[in-house]
Amino acid sequence: MGAFQRCINPQCQATFDVSEVLHRCPKCGSLLDVDYEWDKLQVPSSLSHFEKYWSERSNPRRFSGVWRFHELLPFAPLEECVTVGEGQTILQRNDGVAAYVGKSAGSLFLQYEGLNPSGSFKDNGMAAGTTHGRLVGAKSAACASTGNTSASLALYCSTAKFGKSIVFIGSGKIAYGKLSQALDYGARTIQIKGDFDDAMARVQEVSKALGIYLLNSLNPFRLEGQKTIMFRVLEALRWEVPDWIVVPGGNLGNSSAFGKAFIELHKLGLIKKVPRLAVVNAAGADSLYRLYNEEGLRWNGGNIDKAKIDAFYSQMDKENRRASTIASAIEINRPVNLTKCLRALDFCDGVVRKVSEQEILDAKAQIGANGFGCEPASAASVAGAKQLVAEGVIGKDERIACVLTGHQLKDPNATVAYHGNDREFYEKILGTRGVKTTEFANRPIVVDNDVDRILDLLK
Ligand code: F0G
């Protein structure tokens, strides 16, 4: 059908049928891409081609912000693609946030992925991943998660008519908004004593042993869905490529998918310019930052210095350094898509930054005050943009799109601790993390239960 899987290692490039369920190349252990024989497929001659689907919204697959770009991820017949209405998310100009990061009015845009059915960008990938799962006859699916993947998997599994979904989470690490979703959507929730990296290792072993379909971003089909976030950014800019894409980095699935989207669009002649990519780590979960900026790790034409990565991780283990951040979604030590992210950074002339807990929470409060509530991890993109503008790396007038990856209600604790009056709660949630000020707090006003007092206060 024109789609196949290919090892990303240029020295290997082994290919496999789309019907095979693989997460790494069986020959060399590298990650896999979904690739296409574009010359045998009907590729649109310009991106404006997709506008014709806007009027077909009564067809759920054209309504979907993932599948209306089907021609750019054609690994399954359109009629068989799973959808629950994901990707109704568009890029929106936000001058308030632009002012906060030091940019001119009209130059900063927010891609609000919190509007997805399960409240995070994961639904883009899950629509594609469950489609592939169904294609290969999967009966059940599993993932490890810092919360959002599990919420999304649990939601999509019932739509895709899989049996029970299984989610692995670390103990005490998951925001309640996300845990509540996994439980409510009926996923078997396995809470292990350990962190996300432990959960990631266990889920791979368990899925292999029991033949369960794995839906982490290690699954290359998931990343096909996540490419469409970039297609929608371009769509909202009437197919003009922005100067920068800024995205939080956790397991590095998004950054990898965005890079692949631009590599393909460029190769197909659908874009001329390539945006620069900024991937933002939380300072408390900064493996990519250290590897890229301190160790000088690069894609290097696919010849990645594996010894450098191994030495870095073994030193991390020796020092017992473990990720810790209020942005629990990106609290990850060993990002599984590291090598694909390096490829994306290479193609998009990328940069990597890290932001403190204080910077994340202040940015989050500013995003909220300007009408786009998000969870802490998402705010890392805006905090990172602010840093890059201050450094002069991002120009004041350059057009940037910051991806807001998850909804505000995913993690109300962080929000209430920042804005609230409860000192004890603040200390418990934020104080121990070195968050000293709440400059942008919108405190609730405590008042007697007396209408005159309330009126006095509001006059
Ligand atoms: N933002 C949010 C809200 C997330 O949930 C995640 C990842 C990221 C950013 C990082 O994205 O992994 O593509 O670099 N959450 C995963 C999960 C790990 O299990 O829900 P990435």
Image (cartoon, helix red, strand yellow):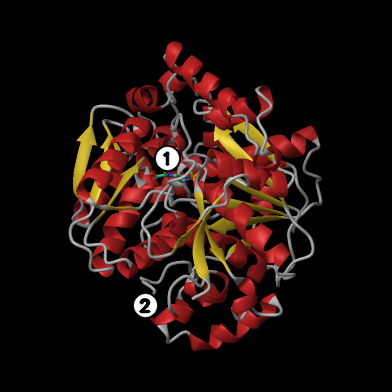
Q: Quadrant of residue 292?
A: top right
Q: Quadrant of residue 135?
A: bottom left
Disc 2 to disc 1, how far (Cα)? 31 Å
Residue annotated with mark 2: 80
Residue for point 37% across, 68% down: 131
Q: Which mark is residue 329?
A: 1
Classify 10 Å Cα crowding around label 1: few (below 14), some (14-19), many (20 and above). Answer: many
Q: Nearer the viewer, mark 2 or mark 1?
A: 2
Q: Earlier in the sequence, mark 2 or mark 1?
A: 2
Secondary structure beneath dot 1 equals: helix
Q: Is residue 134 above or below residue 78?
A: above
Q: Is the residue under label 1 in contact with that under label 2 (CB below 8 Å)?
A: no
Label 1, ligand 1: CB separation under 8 Å = yes
Q: Is residue 280 left or right of residue 203?
A: right
Residue for point 70% across, 69% down: 268
* Residue 369 visible in the current orientation: no
Residue for point 57% across, 71% down: 72
Secondary structure beneath dot 2 equals: helix
Q: For the residue marked with disc 1, what is the amino acid?
A: Ala
Classify 10 Å Cα crowding around label 2: few (below 14), some (14-19), many (20 and above). Answer: few
Question: In terms of depth relative to the viewer, which is nearer, 74 or 449?
Answer: 74
**Displayed-image quarter of ligand 1:** top left
Where is residue 120 shown, x and y percent of the image? 43, 54
Q: Is residue 369 above or below residue 155?
A: above
* Residue 375 visible in the current orientation: yes
Q: Quadrant of residue 208?
A: top left
Q: For the residue marked with disc 2, what is the amino acid?
A: Glu
Residue for point 43% across, 46% down: 26
Question: In terms of depth relative to the viewer, which is nearer, 244 or 367?
Answer: 244
Where is residue 188 shown, x and y percent of the image? 18, 49
